[in-house]
């Protein structure tokens, strides 16, 4: 039986090296690459065509959500397993909507990660119970419009996009870091199902999601 080809992507060296050290001992798994950014994940996916990618979410040079969305476009059979510290709405739903197959927290045991990899190959997703609960609640209470799913902060960022502000200007306007702005923008694009910030701005103006004029 062929070994499962796996790529590990996490911008925390200790986490990534720890995962690699454990996975490399598994006879059924072959590590074909490691990276520390969303952009690295995309390049590795293009080059190696892995079966599974273990993906962090918040990273410099491209978030896990952005990378997941892009990878699924050209390598749709790849199973992307999110492994993150976050299980809030701002991360969970955009990741799943982008094409993530399974969603685990970094508190998961190493053997649970191995099982998730094996199950992914068997077309069985594994979702952290806390995340599964959020998903069930969302299906029970569907939103009327896409922007109803945005958090308060994402709405503020969308309003800024509607005014044509750059990431730097949004950062200064809302007193948040550039990395955080990029994450919010990525989440907004996913939730609104639009291709870029220009379309997001058009959406904001069309639906009246605008800041009050001073």
Image (spheres, rainbow, N blue to C red):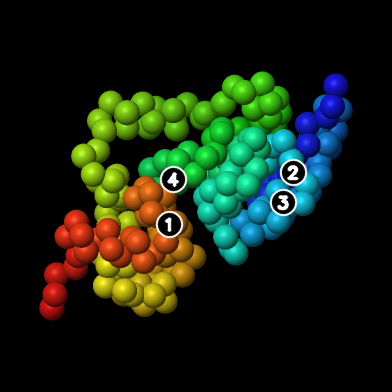
Q: Which residue is mark 3?
A: 46
Judge by depth and name the residue closer to the eye, 122 or 171.
Answer: 122
Mark 3 and mark 4 lie on one chain; the one further toward the N terminus is 3
The answer to whether the residues at label 3 and label 4 have Cβ atoms under 8 Å apart is: no
Q: Is residue 54 left or right of residue 23?
A: left
Under circle 3, the secondary element is helix
Q: Is residue 66 left or right of residue 171?
A: right
Closer mark to the observer between disc 3 and disc 4: 3
Estimate the spatial distance between the alpha carbons at disc 3 and disc 1, rounded to whole Å. Answer: 21 Å
Mark 2 and mark 1 lie on one chain; the one further toward the N terminus is 2
**Mark 1 Cα-neighbour bin, 10 Å: few <14, some 14–19, many ≥20:** few
Estimate the spatial distance between the alpha carbons at disc 4 and disc 1, rounded to whole Å. Answer: 14 Å
Q: Position of residue 154 (x, y in %)?
A: 32, 56
**Mark 2 Cα-neighbour bin, 10 Å: few <14, some 14–19, many ≥20:** some
The answer to whether the residues at label 4 and label 2 have Cβ atoms under 8 Å apart is: no
The answer to whether the residues at label 2 and label 3 have Cβ atoms under 8 Å apart is: yes
Under circle 1, the secondary element is loop
Estimate the spatial distance between the alpha carbons at disc 3 and disc 4, rounded to whole Å. Answer: 22 Å
Q: Which residue is mark 1?
A: 195
Estimate the spatial distance between the alpha carbons at disc 2 and disc 3, rounded to whole Å. Answer: 6 Å
Mark 3 and mark 1 lie on one chain; the one further toward the N terminus is 3
Q: Which residue is mark 2?
A: 49
- Which label is found at residue 94? 4
Q: Position of residue 91 (x, y in %)?
A: 45, 46
Under circle 2, the secondary element is loop
The structure residue drawn at horizontal position 41% and vertical position 50%, both measured from the top left corner, is 190
Closer mark to the observer between disc 4 and disc 2: 2
**Mark 4 Cα-neighbour bin, 10 Å: few <14, some 14–19, many ≥20:** many
């Amino acid at each position: 039986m062929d070994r499962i080809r796996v790529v590990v992507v996490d911008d925390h060296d200790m986490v990534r090296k720890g995962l690699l050290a454990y996975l490399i001992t598994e006879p059924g798994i072959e590590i074909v690459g490691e990276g520390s950014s969303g952009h690295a994940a995309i390049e590795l996916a293009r080059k190696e065509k892995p079966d599974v990618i273990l993906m962090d979410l918040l990273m410099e040079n491209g978030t896990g959500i952005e990378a997941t969305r892009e990878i699924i476009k050209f390598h749709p059979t790849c199973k992307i397993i999110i492994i993150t510290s976050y299980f809030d709405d701002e991360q969970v739903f955009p990741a799943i909507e982008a094409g993530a197959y399974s969603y685990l927290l970094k508190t998961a045991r190493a053997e649970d990660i191995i099982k998730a990899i094996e199950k992914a190959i068997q077309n069985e997703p594994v979702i952290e119970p806390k995340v599964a609960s959020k998903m069930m609640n969302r299906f029970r209470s569907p939103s009327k419009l896409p922007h109803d799913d945005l958090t308060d902060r994402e709405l503020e960022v969308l309003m800024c996009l509607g005014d044509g502000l750059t990431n730097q200007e949004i950062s200064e306007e809302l007193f948040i870091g550039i990395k955080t702005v990029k994450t919010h923008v990525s989440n907004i694009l996913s939730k609104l199902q639009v291709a870029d910030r220009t379309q997001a701005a058009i959406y904001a103006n069309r639906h009246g999601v605008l800041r009050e004029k001073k």
